[in-house]
Amino acid sequence: MASDSDTDLAAGLARALRASGMADPVTVEDLRRLSGGASRETWAFTATAGSERRRLILQRVRGGATMAGPSLAAEDALLAAAARAGVPVPPVVVDAAGCAAALGAARITAHVDGEALGPRIVRQDRFAAARSLLPGQCGRALAAIHAIDPATVPGLVPVDTLGRLRDGLDLVGEARPAFELALRWLHDHRPPPRPERVVHGDFRIGNLLVDETGLQAVLDWELAHLGDPLEDLGWLCVRAWRFGGDGEVGGVGPLDDLLSAYATATGTPVSADEVRWWITAGTLTWGLICAVQARRHLDGHVRSVELATIGRRVCETEYDLLDLLEVSAPDAPGPDASAPGPAAPDVTGSGADAHGRPTAAELVEAVRAHLADVVAPELEGAAAFQLKVATNALGIVERELQARPTSRLSADDEADLAAAVRSGHDLDATQLAELRAAVVDRLRVANPRWLHPADQPATA
């Protein structure tokens, strides 16, 4: 049975479609929510009018959400320009202006067949042929995006990547030595800037519709801006968007295939070193985004287990940045094993069962297993996703209760190291080794699967 809010939404969709020229009466069926991000919701539905039956998609700005990128009207102009440039995009059925009266800030597009979930694209056998094609297809699609004349898309603003990173890290109070090391490296090694072009801003596996033949549509244009076009290539290659795949390009293929296709389409060569600078910048950007999302939960602006859990992904980016900066040298001296370290939680001795058995860790494990094994199979769609997020959060709690840290660095110690890097000091080999150990400790709790085999805990 549809809720009152679903009924109201269906009525608004019908009004918007009638106003756009669809024959009256319009019937809206099969309305279901596909996702709900920090600022937008996506819904699928079928609209019927007489003999006409259309599968459609609604994107709607959530009430109270702040638009970080261009306005919906500017996005409409960008989508039209992208289509003219040959970028595969979902056809717009009702633009923002046509939706405003009935739906508020929203847009209706045609449904395009394809898969958007990154893990499926990267891992499932049915996309094996598509994976071999995607790097080249992405290179050509990005070339088409970057060929759009910025003058035809009013409302896009330039973004200073390094300035945004510094301001953002200061705003959320992220005093992390790995971030400071990366920001210094980015300043010191920045390649010559390319002419300012239209940048998609979130071009990655997960925001692309893919079928067995490859790329079908480029989605999610709400972070579009003006800037260096290589930002898009680097973002596509950030490890977070590889979903466990081996390929440097979104987990599906080699960087050379992407660069070759892009250079052929644009007539301008691109070096791997340039793109790897932007991979580093993108990795740091993702770390900042994770910290900002967690802060929204911690400050009470949006109470969300998803945002809370994202906060624990910051250490994934610290780990990746240390790899990119080659801080993981095996001959770096580690902490003195004979020196006293932080006391590990007592999860098996008398202290663990002071409140009786099962212990806190055992209760968390029991609840997590119940939700994953009993409740999850009964759910689908957004509810199933939210439950997965909740079970992931419980897994983090379970591992933290059982953790035995190897690093002696406290939060204050790391803040001091971050301040030292910012002020221009270099960290010695021992400090770098201890920093890496602290990051590995965090990641063993947050997501041990992210670690390289050599850093995996013995019990993982």
Image (spheres, rainbow, N blue to C red):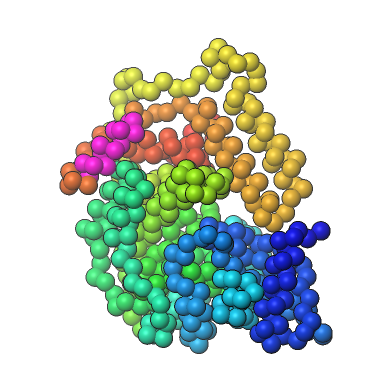
Query: Compared to 257, does 34 lie above or below?
Result: above
Point 75% across, 86% down: residue: 23
Of residues 223 and 317, which is closer to you in this image? 223
Of residues 171 and 377, which is closer to you in this image? 171
Image x and y of residue 400, in percent: 51, 31
Image x and y of residue 441, in percent: 42, 35
Report the side of 371 relative to 389 (left or right). Answer: right
Residue 140 shows in the view: no
Tell me if residue 415 is in the magenta stretch: yes
Image quadrant where one finds the N terminus: bottom right
The residues colored magenta run 409-421
Query: Compared to 268, does 460 lie above or below?
Result: above
Residue 302 shows in the view: yes
Point 50% across, 87% down: residue: 84
Point 78% across, 60% down: residue: 2
Image quadrant where one finds the C terminus: top right
The picture quadrant where one finds residue 98 is bottom right
Image x and y of residue 78, in percent: 47, 80
Our reading of the magenta stretch's main secondary structure is helix
Report the side of 292 relative to 61 (left or right). Answer: left
The picture quadrant where one finds residue 329 is top left
Point 57% across, 62% down: residue: 62
Image x and y of residue 139, in percent: 45, 75
Q: Residue furthest top?
A: 350
The picture quadrant where one finds residue 408 is top left
Report the side of 172 relative to 79 (left or right). Answer: left
Tell me if residue 346 is in the magenta stretch: no
